[in-house]
Image: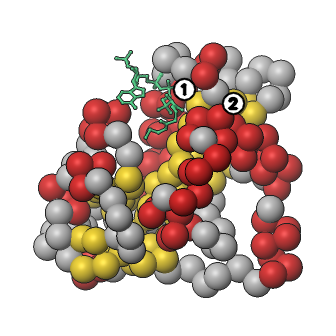
């Protein structure tokens, strides 16, 4: 039995430890991190999974970006579930929850850099973002998009950029 709830500030420490275990300490050098660095997740789109003892065992966050000519979109990730809790459907539940909440909030499209064999089960496709570019090196096979609103990524081309203002120094302390 697990619970998905909105992330709260005290989740930060356990979330970062989980992400270090899942992706390694070099994870912050990834191109997608350039779109997230010093920004807060999109309003209402940062989620935590707790086990029955209340320990953090999963995380998913989405971020506001501008997807070139397609305009506002979300960048999904990172997504992680603690090793011993994997393959129980928690990742699927978390993804479905995050994508539903994004829909409810009126977002039209989601992009990400990740494993296509995993994300294709939620409808993510390379073709949706084939003419978009990220601000750094990326394996094109891992750059994927999903339309929450039909045609939201039709003809999308150009550079993906972060769209929320950078956090001020004090906001960074509070967000850390
Ligand atoms: C990816 C991840 C979040 C999935 O969480 P989960 O709770 O195990 O997910 P689910 O139980 O809903 O689904 C498990 C299924 O996904 C598959 N899967 C997991 N990671 C995968 C990957 N990288 N590529 C392809 N399939 C993958 C499993 O083999 C399993 O397949 P099955 O349903 O045929 O048995 C989790 O494995 C994880 O945190 N991995 C490390 C971090 C990571 O790689 N995150 C994002 C992927 S880029």
Mark 1, Cα crowd under 10 Å, few <14 / some 14-19 / many 20+, is many
x, y percent for residue 134: 35, 70
Q: Are marks 2 and 1 in contact (CB under 8 Å)?
A: yes
Q: Is residue 14 visible?
A: yes
Mark 2, Cα crowd under 10 Å, few <14 / some 14-19 / many 20+, is many
Q: How many marks?
A: 2
Residue that badge 2 annotates: 57
Side of 80 relative to 175 (left or right): left
x, y percent for residue 132: 24, 71
User: Which tag is nearer the camera, tag 2 or tag 1?
Assistant: 2
The quadrant where ligand 1 appears is top left
x, y percent for residue 50: 73, 31
x, y percent for residue 124: 28, 47
Q: Which mark is residue 90?
A: 1
For image coordinates 38% across by 55% down, the residue present is 112
Q: Earlier in the sequence, mark 2 or mark 1?
A: 2
Quadrant of the frame with the C terminus:
bottom right
- Front position in the image: 163 or 96: 163
The residues bearing labels 2 and 1 have C-alpha atoms spaced at a distance of 9 Å
Is the CB of the residue bearing disc 2 within 8 angstroms of ligand 1?
Answer: no
Against 3, residue 161 (above or below) is below
Secondary element at tag 1: helix
């Amino acid at each position: 039995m697990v619970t998905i709830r909105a992330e709260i500030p005290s989740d930060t420490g356990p979330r970062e430890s989980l992400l270090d275990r899942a992706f390694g300490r070099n994870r912050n050098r990834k191109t997608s991190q350039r779109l997230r660095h010093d920004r807060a997740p999109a309003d209402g789109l940062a989620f935590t999974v707790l086990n029955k003892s209340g320990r953090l065992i999963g995380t998913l966050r989405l971020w506001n970006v501008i997807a070139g000519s397609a305009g506002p979109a979300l960048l999904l990730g990172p997504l992680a579930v603690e090793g011993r809790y994997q393959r129980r459907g928690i990742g699927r539940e978390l993804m479905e929850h995050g994508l539903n909440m994004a829909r409810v909030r009126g977002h039209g499209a989601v992009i990400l850099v990740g494993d296509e064999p995993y994300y294709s089960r939620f409808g993510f496709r390379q073709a949706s973002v084939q003419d978009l570019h990220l601000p750094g090196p990326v394996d094109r096979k891992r750059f994927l998009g999903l339309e929450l609103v039909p045609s939201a990524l039709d003809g999308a081309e150009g550079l993906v950029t972060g769209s929320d203002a950078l956090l001020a120094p004090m906001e960074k302390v509070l967000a850390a």
